[in-house]
Amino acid sequence: MANIKSAKKRISVIKKKTAKNRRIRDHIKSVTKNFEKALAAGDMTVAQEKLRLLEKKLDKAAAKNVIHKNKAARKISRMAKRFNAAQAK
C-alpha cells in the first residue's frame, strides 16, 4: 500500500478513471448487442439508428482514449459492412 500522499491520490484517481472507462466499454457492448438484435430481427430502421449510435459512441471512446482509434474504426467498418449486407438481402 502507498505511504506517500501523492501515490494515494494517484490510486484514487486511477480507480475513478477505471470505473469511468469500464462504464463506457460496457455501454458500447450493450449498444452493439442491441444493434445485433435489430439486425437479426430484420428491423432495418432500428438497426440503422443503433448503428449510428454505435458509431458515435465508438468515436467518442476513441477520442477519450478509452479504446484505440484503429479499433473503433475497425468495429465501425465491420458493423457497417454487416448492416449493408443485411440490407442488400
Image: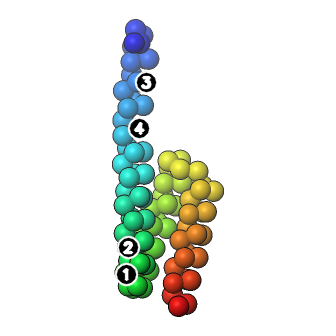
How are the colours assigned in the image?
A: rainbow
Marks 2 and 3, how far apart at CA: 40 Å
* Type of the residue with mark 1: Ala
Indicate which label's residue lies in the foreground, 4 or 1: 1
Q: Position of residue 87 (x, y in %)?
A: 51, 87
Numbered tag placed on residue 10 in the rendering = 3
Marks 4 and 3, how far apart at CA: 12 Å
* Type of the residue with mark 2: Lys
Q: Which of marks 4 and 2 is nearer the N terminus?
A: 4
Do the CB atoms of the residues marked 4 and 3 lie less than 8 Å apart? Answer: no
Q: Which residue is drawn at 37% across and 73% down?
A: 37
* Type of the residue with mark 4: Thr
Do the CB atoms of the residues marked 2 and 1 lie less than 8 Å apart? Answer: yes
Relative to residue 1, is residue 68 drawn left or right? right
Do the CB atoms of the residues marked 3 and 1 lie less than 8 Å apart? Answer: no
Q: Residue at x 49, y 60 (%)?
A: 58
Relative to residue 40, is residue 69 drawn left or right? right
| Residue position marked by numbered label 2 in the rendering | 37
Indicate which label's residue lies in the foreground, 2 or 3: 2
Mark 3: secondary structure: helix
Numbered tag placed on residue 49 in the rendering = none
Q: Earlier in the sequence, mark 2 or mark 3?
A: 3
| Residue position marked by numbered label 4 in the rendering | 18
Marks 2 and 1, how far apart at CA: 6 Å
Do the CB atoms of the residues marked 4 and 2 lie less than 8 Å apart? Answer: no
Q: Which residue is drawn at 55% across and 90% down?
A: 88
Relative to 20, say whether 82 is above or below: below
> Crowding near pointer 2: few (<14 within 10 Å), some, many (20+)?
some
| Residue position marked by numbered label 1 in the rendering | 41
Mark 1: secondary structure: helix
